[in-house]
Each structure stands twice: as structure tokens, then as C-alpha cells.
Image: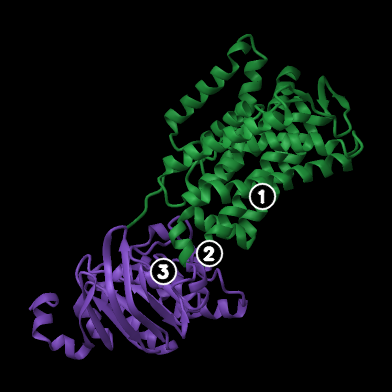
Chain colours: A green, B purple
Amino acid sequence: MSEFLQQLLNGLSLGAIYALIALGYTMVYGVLRFINFAHSDVFMVGAFIGYYAGKLVPAGTIWGGLTVLAAAMLGCAVLGMTIERLAYRPLRGAPTLNVLITAIGVSLLLEYTGQVFFGAAPRNFPALFPVKNFAVGGLVVSSNQLLVIAVALGLMVGLQLIVYHTRIGTAMRAVSLNPKAAVLMGVNIDVVISFTFGLGSALAAAGGILYALNYPSIDPLMGVMPGLKAFVAAILGGIGNIPGAALGGLVLGTVETFVSGSPWSTYKDAIAFAILIIILLFRPAGLLGRFTVEKV
Amino acid sequence: MLKVTDLSVSYGAISAVSGISFTIEQGSIVTLIGGNGAGKTTTLRTISGLLRPRAGRIEFLGEDLTRLAPHQIVARGLCHVPEGRMIFSNLTVDENLTMGAYLQTDPARIARNRDYVFSVFPRLQERIRQMAGTLSGGEQQMLAISRALMGSPKFLLLDEPSLGIAPRLISTIFEKIVEINRDHGITILLVEQNANLALEVSRHAYVLETGRIVMQGESRQLRADPQLRATYLGG
């Protein structure tokens, strides 16, 4: 039983990171109907901003850690908005395939520019926050796991408030439901798309920092695998659906962790993806996604 | 109030509207009639900024609209009820109306607009919590018009309000269009394939054929025109 709870806790903390990244994929899909493959590299840049900013604040303090987190989120928000402005906006109205290929190009650009500037060798990510292990019953709870869950939960609540209780959030939902109609209501679509990229990228940066705290070795290609899994999580939850992305991330992280702790751990990715395929066979629109019928 | 001069619009190499000019006076209902592909919807979409003209000028209250983005045009009081209605099907009737008031900042005014909309279309009030996608075609059209009214328009562009609606509701909707024009002095540009109805409610009409204005005048007189009757009014 304690083994089960331990794995559940590990799984939820990994899943929370996937969820943070998945939110960015799903929000951008919601407003633009394409997958921003460069998102996983924004996640990587977030970790590197954390690495460098971490040198400027005393290590192992809560305020230092939170400052670094905020700096990485801000930096990546600007990066995400810049990518949208320079790479995707000129292609507005072009076939989705063109935008997808561009996204792959931006992704490679970030990865290899990262190798030029940061070097290809892995670096050791500093312990930004105080680290402590607690023994609760038979469980070992690390402060990092609690941090991941607390930060992810806080950001998701914040996101929910933005999307459902602010004007810009209302505009995001309108664009996601029907961009043409949103424009006719007076929504400035450029501002909404830019904001969506900023928001999604900030969440990816937070994911990058939290990931690096738990797996403290970072390199310019570190985003590839978590990015792919978060993308899968977004599909699993129902692409375009915000609570779906959060749920998908948690499910995927938990499944992966349980498989890792089993005798079949070598096949953890294969099993996780097989479960995804099976779920999608029965629910093609994802766990919380739904097909909609437009009356014309 | 609205002055269109030598407007030309094309989709790539294909010209949809070729040098049309017309003016619409404040407080009137004016209609653009014509068959499929005549350029009616293109004209409306260009006025509201969804399409960029190749040439020509669109002036609204003395200001050139052709360089403005669609949201800036809405902010100037020009609201477009699009062809096919484009309501937010996954939102409730209430939420659709809230979206219509997106640029409105004065809560008192929003409340007034909402009351007015319900007085014009009481049926929407009965369905306020219902998902907009589950409304009938006619109710969706009422909602689309109401949503535009929530934006406190000075000028309404209505694209084919009779399309896909039960015949019984068409006359109701047209009565309401006249009522909206009369109650609030909202100027209306109406695009319709149903020329009979359009000429009945409008003061002035322009007939479009393959992107050109081929006939214009008082709606009353056009209804009596033998050539127009033969082409558009079924003899």
C-alpha cells in the first residue's frame, strides 16, 4: 500500500510537469489550430534561464527560487511572443501544414542555437529551493515534489482565473470557439494570439524549472522527450481543452511512473503510449474533448 | 453616413466586386440584392474590415475605414451580422450576448442593451440558459442580431437574415429589423437573396450583378420595375 502511495505521489509530481507543458500546446491549438512544436524548446530555454538566473540569487532559499521561477516565466513569455510574431504571424491564413513545418524549423533553431550558446554537454542544475525529505508513515516525500505540485496547482488555478474571469480570457475563449465571430465582436485577434503564446510559454518555463529541479541535468535537447509526452498528454486530454490538458498530463505521468516501478520498466514509454492509443481508440476526441456539430 | 466610392475587391486574380459606389443616409434601411456570386457578401465583409479592397474608399461618418482592422471598425459602431449567423454554439444564449458586449465598458449601458434585446426577441429570454447550438435556425438568427445589438451599433450590416429559416419566422425577423431601425434610428444595410422581402422593408435598393451595380433607386419603384420583377421577383 505504501509502495502504491509512493508511486502515486511520484507520478503526480511528474504528471504536474507534463500538465504545465501540455497547457501551452492545448491553448495555442485552441486559438490557432496548429501544434507549436517549438514549445518543448521554450521549456528548455526556461530551464537555462533558471540555470543562469540561479547564479545571481543565493541558492536554497525560497525567495531566491521564486525569483528565478518568475524570471524564467517572464523570459519565456517574451520568447514565445517573439516566436509567434516573427515566425507564425506572417503565415496567418496559410495552410496549417506550412505553419507546422515552420514550427519544426523554429524548434530545431532553438535546439541548435542552444548548443552554440550553452554547449551540448549536460550541466548540473542548482538546487534553487531548500531541499528536505520528510518521512510520512512509510512514504518519503521530498520538498521538491511538494514544490512541483504546489506550483503547478497554483499556476493552473491562476490560469483558470485568467481564462474564465478576465476580459482577455473571454476573448481567448471566443477566438477558440469561432475566430471569425470573435473578430466581429471587436476582439483584436493579434493581441489574443500573442497573449496566448506568452501565457503558454510562461507555463512551459515553470515546467522547465520544476523538471530541472527534479532531474538536475540540463542540456539543449532536454525538451524533446518531455515535450513529446506533454503533447501526447494534451491529445489524451482532448486537444484545445484546458482542463483536459491538465488531466492528460497527470494521467500520463502517473502511468509512466507506475510502469517504471514495475518489472516492465524498460518498456515504460512503450506502455504509456500503448495506453494512449487504446484510450484514443475508444475516445477519439480525448478524455474531455468532444466533437461539436455546427448548425448552418 | 456610409459612403462607398469605386470599391473593388478581388480574391486573388478573381474580381468579386468591380468599382461599386453607393451612399447610405443615417436612419435608413438600404438593401443590396442580387443572385449568388453577385458580390453582396464580399461588399459587406469589406466594409467590416474582414476583406481588404483592391481599390476604392469606404467612409463611415467621414472617416476612412479601409485601413482599419475589424475590431477597430466594430469600436466605431459598425456591427456585422454574418451570413450563416456564426453564433458561439457551445456557449449559452446569455454568454453569446455577453460576447456581443465585448467592447462595451459601461455596465448600465450593457444592461439597457440586454433589456432592449429581450423586448425585441422575448423568445431569447426564455432560452437564456440554453446552449446556442440547440436553438432553431430562426432563433439563432435572432441571437445573431441580438448579439450585434449588444455592441450598441450605430450601423448594422445584415447578411442574408432569411437564409435557412422557417418561412413563418422570416416575416417575424423582418418585422423586428424594421422595429430596430425605427426604435433606435440604427441605420441598416441589408443583403438579401429574397428580393421581395428586402424591397418591402427598405427605402433604397441597389441591384448587384457580377460585382457591378446594374440598377438602383427607391425600393418602392424598383418593385414595380418590369425588368427587375422578371429577374428577381419571379415575374
Say whether disc 1 or disc 2 marks the residue closer to the N-terminus.
1
Position in image of residue A296 (x %, y %)? 32, 58
Rendered position, A101 above or below A198: above
Question: Which label was assigned to residue A99?
Answer: none
SS for dot 3: helix
Q: Nearer the viewer, residue A109 or B230?
A: A109
Residue to which mark 3 is pinned: B143
**How many other residues sit within 10 Å of disc 2, few (<14), some (14-19) or many (≥20)?**
many
Q: Chain of mark 2?
A: A
Mark toward the viewer: 1 or 3: 1
Q: Quadrant of the N terminus of chain A?
A: top right
Question: What percent of the width, then of the height, locates residue A127?
Answer: 85, 30
Instruction: Judge whether B22 appears above or below A261 on screen.
Output: below
Residue pictured at 42% horizontal, 40% vertical: A97
Q: Nearer the viewer, residue B113 or A53?
A: A53
- Give residue A219's position: percent from left, percent from top: 71, 26
A289 on left or right of A129: left
Do discs 2 and 3 share a chain? Answer: no
Q: Which residue is mark 1?
A: A159
Q: Are marks 1 and 2 in contact (CB under 8 Å)?
A: no
The amino acid beneath tag 1 is: Leu
Circle 1 or circle 2, nearest the eye: 2
Mark 3 belongs to chain: B
Q: Residue at x 34, y 80 (%)?
A: B5
Q: Residues within 10 Å of mark 1 (few under 14, many from 20)?
A: some
Question: According to the image, label 2 marks what residue?
Answer: A187
Q: CA distance from mark 2 to mark 3?
A: 19 Å
Q: CA distance from mark 1 to mark 2?
A: 20 Å
* Left or right of B105 in this view: B227: left
The residue depicted at 58 percent of the width and 13 percent of the height is: A267
Amino acid found under the numbered disc labelled 3: Leu
Helix, strand, or loop for circle 2? loop
